[in-house]
Amino acid sequence: MDNEIWNKLEGKKVLVAGDFMVDRYIEGGVRRISPEAPVPVIEVRSERAVLGGAGNVINNILALGGKARAVGYVGADETGDFLLKLLGEKGAGTRFVYRDAAAQTTEKTRVVSGFQQFLRFDKEKIRPLSLKCLRFFRDNEEEMFEGIDIVLLSDYGKGTFTQECAQFFIQSARRRNLKVIVDPKGADYSRYYGATVCTPNVKELREASGLPSDTEQGLLSAAKKVREENGLGYVLVTRSERECP
């Protein structure tokens, strides 16, 4: 693999296209069980909200010294306003985040005590990317890609990456000789055809390939199948706590 992909991001500008969301955390302590139902009562001590999904990817890029341009869509709602504010405060470009009046900005709230998560509730409306949003991307292609060094597609399965949308970003990047890294979702990788690197985890690789991946040879066979069937340059499998051979 070309080592320049993994060099330090200092000063490099990354176009991050994907599913943007807000992660909220309600944190507190448990001292008693509710008299109304057999559930713990959490006494709230703090609440915080951070960038989630593709926004968290931008957090990491900025932490490594890179620059980020956010591309995607959010709803025309308060959560969308808040998300754009968070991105702007981090220093990410938000000009190419489309405000879709028919969409709902995804918001995930976790109730946590100590190291235990008691509850998570999501506010979202999963649907395919609108034609208006795709047209917005196409109309702004030249400016969107101006000065970009690397393209990263962060797919969380919220509808942004239809076949047409994913191929728009990949082919637009390839015309400019830019490398495309994909963090995939789902079992159909055909929409990522032509990407430089695809980074499934072991479970995602198993789903995409239909092959067992619990041995080293199994991993290699599954990755080779996914790469060849979907025209990918490389497949990089992330393995969580498992050690590499």
Image (tube, grey):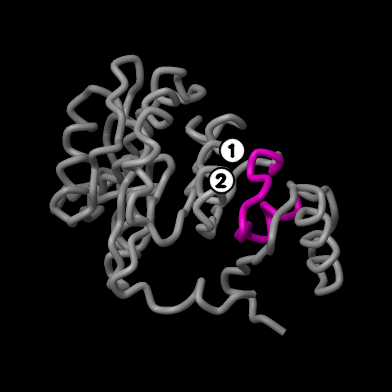
Residue at x 30% of width, y 56% of height: 68
Q: Looking at the picture, which amino acid does disc 2 mark?
A: Ile
Residue extending farthest bottom: 245
Label 2–label 1 contact, CB within 8 A: yes
Q: Which residue is drawn at 77% across and 53% down?
A: 226
Q: Where is residue 49 in the image (x, y as percent from the top left)?
A: 21, 48
Q: Position of residue 140 (x, y in %)?
A: 35, 33
Question: Quick one: SS at disc 1?
Answer: helix
Residue 153 in sight here? yes
Determine the image quadrant of residue 75: top left
Mark 2: give few (<14), some (14-19) or many (20+) Cα within 10 Å.
Answer: many
Pick whichever, 48 or 127, lies toward us. Answer: 127
Left or right side of 237 for 127: left
The residue under the point 37% across, 56% down is: 148
At mark 2, the secondary structure is helix
Against 27, residue 187 (above or below) is above
> Does the image show residue 38?
no
User: Does the stretch in magenta take in 219?
Assistant: no
| Amino acid beneath label 1 | Gln
Crowdedness near tag 1: few (<14), some (14–19) or many (≥20) residues, C-alpha within 10 Å: some
Image coords of residue 179 (percent x, y)? 53, 60
- In three-dimensional space, the C-alpha distance between marks 2 and 1, rounded to whole angstroms, equals 5 Å
> Which residue is the site of mark 2?
170
- Residue 80 position, x and y percent, is 23, 32
Is residue 205 covered in magenta?
A: yes
Nearest to the observer: residue 218 or residue 120: 218
Residue hosting label 1: 167
Q: Is residue 63 above or below residue 27?
A: below
Task: Tell me the quarter of the image containing the N terminus.
Answer: bottom right
- Image: magenta residue range: 189-207
Q: Please identify the quadrant where the C terminus is shown.
A: bottom right
